[in-house]
Amino acid sequence: MPNTRFSGSVSSPDVSVTIDMGHPFLNHTVDGFLKIGAIAATRAVAEDVFHVVKKGSISKGNVEHTLKKMCKEGAYWGTVAGVYVGMDYGIERVRGTRDWKNAMIGGALTGALVSIATSQDKDKIVINAITGGAIATASEFINYLT
């Protein structure tokens, strides 16, 4: 019976784009928007490519749909990320310390703001604030572990 071995390493590329907006708050916010917006747009493309490959054909309509979806998803998630990063940075500056509480407060405020922009249901706003705070706090704790 033949033996097969696979050996290798994977390292993530460090892509850094710096846009100087003249203030650290704006720099962080724009950086978050661009990075997460690009990831969301890439996810939209990957999903649509999967559907095209599964279907076995592509049309002009598929391409137009994918482009619209890329822009919509990129803008939405980029905006959410930009608001969160800006909140986190602002809270850090106000509190004068960098800890998980900044993430919790920033996530809660971001969840509430995004919810207010899309809905007037008070219960949904509170639930989204709690969810945003919980996700941001969990993410911060995971970052501390690694």
Image: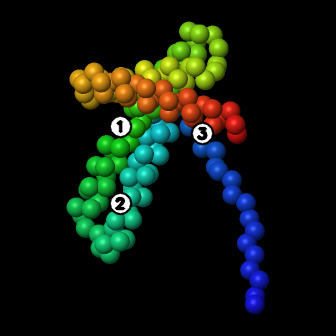
Crowd class of label 2 (few under 14; some 14 to 19; many from 20; radius 10 Å): some
Q: Is residue 98 left or right of residue 91?
A: right
Q: Nearer the viewer, residue 58 or 139?
A: 139
Residue drawn 63% across the image and 37% down it: 142
Element type where label 2 sits in the image: helix
Element type where label 3 sits in the image: loop
Mark 2, residue position: 48
Residue drawn 35% across the image and 44% down it: 73
Task: Identify the mark nearer the N-term, 3 or 1.
Answer: 3
Residue 117: quadrant of the picture: top left
Q: In the drawing, what numbered circle is on residue 76?
A: 1
Q: Is residue 6 left or right of residue 31?
A: right
Crowd class of label 1 (few under 14; some 14 to 19; many from 20; radius 10 Å): some
Task: Identify the mark nearer the N-term, 1 or 2.
Answer: 2
Image height of 42 relative to 113, above or below: below
Residue drawn 69% across the image and 57% down it: 10
Residue drawn 65% across the image and 14% down it: 97
Mark 3, residue position: 16
The image's colouring method is rainbow
How many angstroms separate mark 1 from mark 2 (CA)? 18 Å
Q: Quadrant of the N terminus?
A: bottom right
Q: Nearer the viewer, residue 91 or 62?
A: 91
Crowd class of label 3 (few under 14; some 14 to 19; many from 20; radius 10 Å): few
Contact, CB < 8 Å: mark 2 with mark 3? no
Q: Measured from the top left, where is residue 135 in percent x and y?
A: 50, 33
